[in-house]
Image: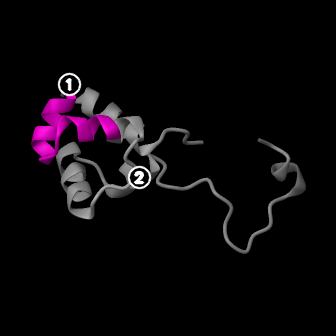
Amino acid sequence: METKHMGDRIREMRTQKEWSQAELARRVKVSRATVNQWESGTIKNIKLETFLRLVAVLGCTPNHLILGPSGTVNAPQPGRKRSPSAANRT
């Protein structure tokens, strides 16, 4: 089950490339503070144009960045009832 958030994945991909926040910011054409806020989760909504630049610069798919490597969301499906035992797990 994927427990990382998009900011965690941004940080992970950036550090795999051995880039500082400033370097990623330069490549995506945003401020270093913006990259820091993405990674910390302070900014959760990224403008589409900026998001597409980020995806291109990191060399990943939008789904990978948003959902993680599995590309799926672990949320109940609309119209499907959860089992009582699943509802009691937290």
Q: Residues within 10 Å of mark 1 (few under 14, many from 20)?
A: few
Count the numbered circles shown: 2
Q: Residues within 10 Å of mark 2 (few under 14, many from 20)?
A: some
**Residue 66 circle label:** 2
The residue at the point 17 percent across, 46 percent down is: 57
Question: Residue 53, image x and y in percent?
Answer: 18, 54
Question: Residue 84, image x and y in percent?
Answer: 89, 55
Q: In the picture shown, does residue 21 fall above or below 29?
A: above
Left or right, residue 82 beside residue 42: right
Instruction: Give the magenta-colored segment's residue range.
Output: 20-37
30 part of magenta stretch? yes
Question: Residue 8, image x and y in percent?
Answer: 41, 36
Q: Amino acid at mark 2?
A: Ile
Q: Work out which residue is located at the far right of the displayed protein and give it.
A: 84
73 part of magenta stretch? no
Q: Quadrant of residue 62?
A: bottom left
Give the quarter of the figure containing the C terminus. top right
Mark nearer the N terminus (1 vs 2): 1
Left or right, residue 59 beside residue 23: right
Q: Work out which residue is located at the far bottom of the displayed protein and give it.
A: 79
The residue at the point 11 percent across, 42 percent down is: 27
Q: Amino acid at mark 1?
A: Glu
Left or right, residue 59 beside residue 86: left
Question: Residue 42, image x and y in percent?
Answer: 40, 42
The secondary structure that most of the magenta stretch takes on is helix
Q: Secondary structure at mark 2?
A: helix
- For the residue pair 63 and 8, the one nearer the viewer reads as 8
Q: Secondary structure at mark 1?
A: loop
Residue to which mark 1 is pinned: 18
Contact between marks 1 and 2 (CB within 8 A): the answer is: no
Give the quarter of the figure containing the N terminus. top right
Distance between mark 1 and mark 2 Cα atoms: 21 Å
